[in-house]
Image: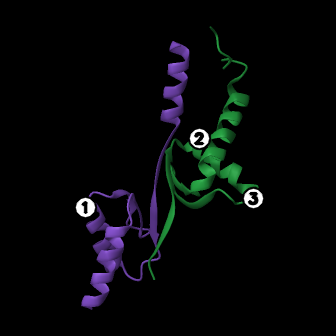
Chain colours: A purple, B green
Amino acid sequence: VVDQIRLWQLENERMRTMAGFLFKDFDSAEEYLSLSEYAEEIGVLVWKNDRKRMFFASKFEQLRDYLKSRKKAE
Amino acid sequence: MVRAIRGVLIECEPAIKSIIVHLDSANNDIIIEDLDETHLVVKENMVQVLKQKLDDRLKETYRPEEPLEDSE
């Protein structure tokens, strides 16, 4: 049993997975920064790369609403 | 125009990542985006297949030194 537990732990260390959404193809750096900062603020930001202007978030709905309200305000 | 693509983020060591990249290269049906040395986004429906393939690959590699058969 100990061996099996050890194997299971190895399996978990080998690969961490999380379902969510990749945000990419932003029109501007400003749009990227504003949305990624908002994602961080509400606690859904999992990974980001400022240079690539991409981030991964665990949830989608609030970010979509944020984008919509932002577009309206423009 | 910004896009949100549904997928599964995988975090793993570079050696594992390179195996995944290699598995994907056959049909390009696993990876959505290669993010960096230790991260990539894959299709949600491919995660189980990927885990299985990775297991097979690692068993092949490690069999001589550490048998994975149940030792009890």
Identified by mark 1, the residue type is Ile
Give left or right: position of A34 versus A26.
left
Whole-angstrom CA distance, mark 1 to mark 2, is 33 Å
Which is more foreground, mark 1 or mark 2?
1
So how many labels did they put on this image?
3
Identified by mark 2, the residue type is Ala
Q: In the rendered image of this protein, does residue A29 appear above or below residue A43?
A: below
Front residue (pair B54, A64): A64
Residue positioned 24% across, 89% down in the render = A73
Front residue (pair B54, B18): B54
Give left or right: position of A61 versus B62.
left
Specify the subunit that label 3 lies on: B
Quadrant where the N terminus of chain B sits is bottom left
Give left or right: position of A19 versus B27.
left
Q: Quadrant of residue A38?
A: bottom left
Q: Quadrant of residue A63?
A: bottom left
Using the image, tell me which numbered label, if any, was put on residue B27. 3
Cβ atoms at labels 1 and 3 below 8 Å apart: no
Residue hosting label 2: B15
Q: SS at mark 3? A: loop
Residue hosting label 1: A42
